[in-house]
Image (cartoon, rainbow, N blue to C red):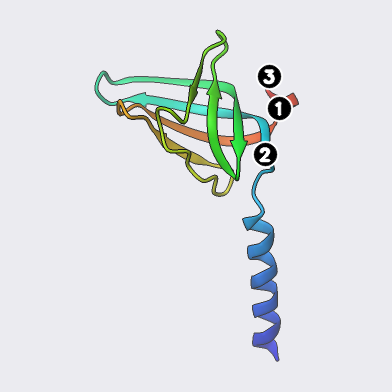
């Protein structure tokens, strides 16, 4: 009986964790690294999420990086890792409501 209770709790937890982010625009902390040049930068930027995957990063200058240059990664525990076709790496974390992007 106890093991059945644990199984139910585990399944409910997986449902809650698996729900992920609804489609929309969010704020996120981005760690950028380009191994070829050694360049590293940190940003707080808007990102588009679709099907619990990061599809687009919007730069403050009006530009964007989208899925033409990377395979949209799944968000797990509020984090995602992107590697572009050029080898640039982005760690996306602390994905939160768009209005908290300051």
- Residue 27 location (% of width, % of height): 64, 28
Disc 3 residue crowd, few under 14, some 14–19, many 20+, Cα 10 Å: few
Nearer mark to the viewer, of 1 and 3:
1
Q: Residue furthest bottom?
A: 1
Q: Residue at x 64, y 57 (%)?
A: 17
Which mark is on residue 102? 3
Residues 79 and 73: in front is 73
- Residue 44 location (% of width, % of height): 58, 22
The picture quadrant where one finds residue 47 is top right
Give the quarter of the figure containing the N terminus.
Answer: bottom right
Label 2 vs 1, first from the N-terminus: 2
The relative height of residue 6 versus residue 88 in the rendered view (above or below) is: below
Q: Which residue is mark 1?
A: 98
Q: Residue at x 54, y 16 (%)?
A: 59
Which mark is on residue 82? none
- Residue 53 location (% of width, % of height): 55, 41
Q: Residue at x 54, y 49 (%)?
A: 76
Q: Which residue is mark 2?
A: 23
Residues 60 and 9: in front is 60
Q: Residue at x 69, y 77 (%)?
A: 8
Q: Secondary structure at mark 3?
A: loop
């Amino acid at each position: 009986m106890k093991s059945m209770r644990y199984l139910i709790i585990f399944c409910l937890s997986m449902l809650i964790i698996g729900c992920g982010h609804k489609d929309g625009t969010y704020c996120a902390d981005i760690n950028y690294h380009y191994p070829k040049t050694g360049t590293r930068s940190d940003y707080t930027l808007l990102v588009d999420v679709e099907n619990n995957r990061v599809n687009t990063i919007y730069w403050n200058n009006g530009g964007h990086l989208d899925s033409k240059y990377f395979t949209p990664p799944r968000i797990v525990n509020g984090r995602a890792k992107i590697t572009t076709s050029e080898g640039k790496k982005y760690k996306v974390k602390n994905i939160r409501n768009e209005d908290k992007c300051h």
